[in-house]
Amino acid sequence: MTQLDDRIEPHSPLPEGVSAQVETTHDVRVTTPAKICGVGHAMKRKEDPRFIQGKGRYIDDIKLPGMLYMDIVRSPYAHAKIKKIDASEALAMDGVVAVITGEDLKAAGDLHWMPTLMSDTQMVLPIEKVVYYAQEICVVVATERYIAADAIEKVVVDYEPLEVVIDPHLAMEDKVIVRDDKEKKTNHIWHWEAGDKEATDKVFAEAAHVVEQSMHIPRIHVVSIETCGMVANYNKATEHMQMYMTSQAPHAHRTIFAMVSGLPEHKIQIISPDIGGGFGGKVPIYPGYVCCVVASLTLGKPVKWIEDRSENLQADSFARDYHIEAEMAADHDGKITGLRVKTLADCGAADAAANPSKFPAGMYSICTGSYDMKAAHIAVDGVYTNKPPGGVAYRCSFRVTEAVHMVERLTDIMAHKLGEDPADFRLKNFIRPDQFPYKSPTGWDYDSGNYQAALEKAMELIDYPSLRKEQAEKRKRGELMGIGISSFTEVVGAGPSRDFDILGLKMFDSAEIRIHPTGKAMARFGTKSQGQGHETTYAQIIAEELGLPAEDIQIEEGDTDTAPYGLGTYASRSTPTAGAAGVMAARKIKAKAKKIAAHLLEVGEDDLEWNVDKFQVKGSPDQAKTIQEIAFAAYTNHPPGMQAGLEATDYYDPPNLTFPFGSYICVVDIDSGTGEVHVRRFVAVDDCGNIINPLIVEGQIQGGLTQGLAPALFEEIVYDENGQNLTGTLADYLVPTAVETPKWELGRTITPSPHHPLGAKGVGESATVGAPPAIVNAVVDAMWHLGVRHVEIPMTPQRIWALLREHGVAD
Amino acid sequence: MKISGEYTFDADPEAVWKGLMDPEVLAATMPGCEKLELVGENQYEGELNIKIGPVQGKFRGRIELENIEAPNSYDLKVDGQGAQGFVKATVHVAIEAVEDKTRMTYEGDSQVGGRIASVGQRLMDSSAKAIIRQSLAGLNEVISGASAGEGDDAEAPAQVAAPSQAAFAANIAKEVARDLVPKPVWIALLVLVALVITYLIMR
C-alpha cells in the first residue's frame, strides 16, 4: 500500500432531477390499511419480541464444540521498541494451546500488516515497535477464557521506550516519527482541499465582518453496549472458514479477508448475528479479528475472541479528533458570504477511517451547511500521532458532525457579533426553497430542503419569543440562562458509485425478494442492522410495494452465504440504498405479477390497475387477483412461456446522496456556583423526507440526541503526555444515563427526496450530528454578555466554572 | 505524578542512613515487596506485588542510588515492569537532624503506565502515598528499635513483617478519604471501610 497523494476533492456531474424544489408537508403519508402495514405505519418492531425476552443471538452467545478462547497481550507504552517477547511461562500453563506473535504472522505469509479501509496500513501484531498504548502485542489461545486471561499476564515483553508524540501540532514538526516503516519520514499523511481558494480569499478581502474561532472536536468513542468479538471456525477438511463477527459490513469484510489472507472467497462465510450497537465502530477490521482467524486456521478449531470493556475503550477506533481553525465572512447586511477553514486531523498511528477513497476527510466539505454563501475553501491535513488509529464515522456520515459543529458555532458567533437574534440571522441566511436545484460552493448537489420551515416549526414548538423574554428577565437577576439553535444539514446515503467506494468496492446496496407459493415472503439485504430495526422497516417497504402484510415478510441480513452482496450499514445509508433496492426488486416482482394476473384474468396487461394488494380490471374492480393468488399461480399455473417463481434481485446505485436536515433548539440553565449545565428543554424538528416507520424514526432521534448530548457535556478520550489512556473504564469515560438525559421534544417536517424511490432520506445519524452545537450555542448564549465567545466540548462543570471565574462571576 | 513529602524518624541521621542503605530493611518494610537484592554497587533488583483497585500484579524492577552524599542525600531511581504496566520514578531523598530526631524530605517525579494507570488511575495517587507512608513507618519502627537496642546485636535488624494485604488496602482507603473528604467525615468513613474489610477477610 502506498501513501495517499495530495489531492483535490472531485465531484462528478449528476443526472437531471436529483436536486429539486420539493413541497414540504407535516403529516406522514400512509397509503395502505393497517393489516398490510406499509410505509407510514407506526408498526412495533418485529425484532423486539426476541430482544426483550433475552433471545437475541450475539457473538458471545455462539458456542461451538471444542471451542478455544483467545486473549490479547497489549502494550503499556505508546511508543517503544520490542526487544523480546518471552511467552515460555504462559505456554507452560495447563490449558494454554498457543501463543501467536508478529513473527508468527510474518511467517504465515506477511500477515503482520494489513490494509486499513483508507488505503493506509496498520500492524496486526508488531515486530519492531509499538506505536500506541494498548496496541496488540501477541495473543494467547487457551481452552478456557479464564486461563487465557491469566496466561497473558505471564507473557514477558521487554520494551525499550521511545519518545512519544501525542499533540498533532507537535507531530507536524516531525521530531518523533510515528511510522518509520513508511518511505517518507514524516508524520504528515495527506493534504486535502475542497472549494475555491481564490474566490474565498476575495470574499474575505471584501467582507464587512469576519469572525474566527478555533475549536477542537475531541476524540470520543462509540461505546456500543456489545464490544467487538469473533468466533472463527476453520474446518481443515472442507477448507471452509466460517466467521461469526461483529461486522457492520460483512460482505466487504469477506472480500478484504480473502484479498489479504489469500483464502478463496467462496470458502469464507461471515455471519454477523444480532449486533448490540455499531455506530461506525464495527466497520473497521481490528487486529483481534485477524489474530482470531489465524488462530483458528492454524489450530483447526473454533476460536472465540471477545473484547473486554477496557480493551474496547482503549484500542478500538476512535471518532472525531479534528483541530479546526475557521473563519466566516459577512457583508454589511449581515449576509454570510464565505467560509475559510483549516483543519488538522489527528489520525492516530494509522489512517483507519472508513471514508470513501476520494474523500480522505470524508464529507467534511459539506460544512457550508444550511447557509447560502458565495465561496468556501477547506484545507485538511492528516497527521500521525502515538494514539490508536481510527477516525470512524461515529453515528455520522463521514465527518459531517465536525462540519456541522463548526458552521453552527460560527453562525452563532457571527449573529451575536452583529447583535442579531441567532434565529433571525439563520432565517435570513438559509438556502431558500426556491434556490433548488442547489449546488453548494464546495460542489455538493443538495437533493431538497426547506430550512425555514423546520426552524419556524421548532420556534413555534418551544415558544421562542417567550424564552427570549424569560432570558432577559433572568439576566437582570444575574441568572444564567441560554438558548441555542442548530440548523444542520446532513449528507447521507453513500453513495453514487461514481464517487463513493470503500477500498474500490462501490457503495451500492442490494435486496433479494422471494415470494413463496402461499403468499409469504423472504427478503435478504446487503446491509446489516445493529439495532436500527431493519427487519421492520424493510418489511414495510416491501409491504407498501407489493401489498403483502409486513408480518408475512421475513427479513434476513448478515450471512454472506445467503444475502446478496452489499456494502453494509453506516452513514445512514440503509434506507437510501438497500431500502431503495428493496423497492426496485419489489417493482420487478410486481411487473411479473401483472403478467400473471393478466393471464389468470384473461385480459391484457394494459387493462389492469394496481389497488393496494391486488391487480384489478379497470372499470370492473370485482375482477381482481390478490398478490397472494398471483404468488400461488406463479408456482402452480404460470403463463406458458414464462419462467415459474416470483423473485427478484436489485443492486441499487443511488443517483445522488440524500440531505436530511433539521432545526434543534436547546434551553440551558447554568449553575454559576458549580458550573453545571442543566439542559432544561430540547426541541428537535427533523426532516428526513418521507417516513417509513414513525415509531422507529422517533426512536432513532431520541437515541441520536442522547449520543449528541454525550460529547457536548461528558465524553472525551483523554491521554497524558506519555500517551497513556486515562479514560479506560466507564468510571472515567462518562456516558450519560437516563438521569443526565433531558426529555426530548420531537417535531417534524417532511420534504421528500426527489430521487429516492420512496422519497426517504435516512435519519439514523441526524440527531447525533445536529445536537452538540445546539447545546454549545445555548451555553455560550447564556454567557455571551459576560464576554464568553466559545466553549470547547465536553462542557464539563470544571470548564464552565473556570470560564465563569475568568469572566468575573464568583458566587 | 509528582511524589513529595516529609517524614520524621525517631532516630539519629546516622541510624536512618544505615537503614536507608540496607536492602533487607527496605524489603521488610515496603508493603508488597517480595524480594530486594543488591546486584551491584548501589544497584538493587526486586519484585513488588501491587494491588490497586481492580488491578493486581507483580512488578520486577531495578533500583539505583545515584549522587550519594552520605549521610545526607541520594537520588533514588526506580524502573519497574510487569504484566500490568510499568513504573518509572526518580526521587531525591534528603535527611537532616532535627533536635534528637531525623527529618526526611523526598521529592520527585514518577511515570506510571499500562493497565495499572488506565484502570487503577483514580486510586493510584492514594496508593502511592499509602505505600510510601507505610514503608517509612515500618522503616521508623526498625530503625528506632535497632538504635535503642544498639550494642547487643547491631548486625541483625529487628524483624518487622511487611504489612498484610488487608492492612495495605485499609491504608489506601485512608489516603483516598484524606484526599476527598473533610477530616471528621473521613475518620467515620475509615471506621466503616475498616469494618467492611474486616468482614471481607473474616467471612
Image (tube, coloured by chain):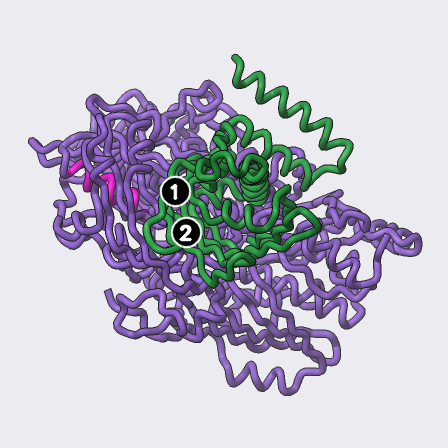
Q: Secondary structure at mark 2?
A: strand
Residue A395 left/right relative to A636 = right
Q: Identify the residue at image location x=42%, y=44%.
A: B23
Q: Say which label, 1 or 2, has the lower sequence index.
A: 1
Residue A66 quadrant: top left
User: The chain shown in purple is which?
Assistant: A
| Closer to the camera in the image, A608 or B136 | B136
The residue carrying mark 1 is B36
Q: Identify the residue at image location x=59%, y=36%.
A: B148
The residue carrying mark 2 is B63
* Region of the chain picked out in magenta, as a range: A282-297
Q: Is residue B195 magenta?
A: no
| Closer to the camera in the image, A53 or A78 | A78
Task: Tell me what hue chain B is rendered in.
Answer: green
Could you say where residue A296 lies in the image, as x and y percent from the top left? 18, 36
| Residue type for callout 2 | Ile
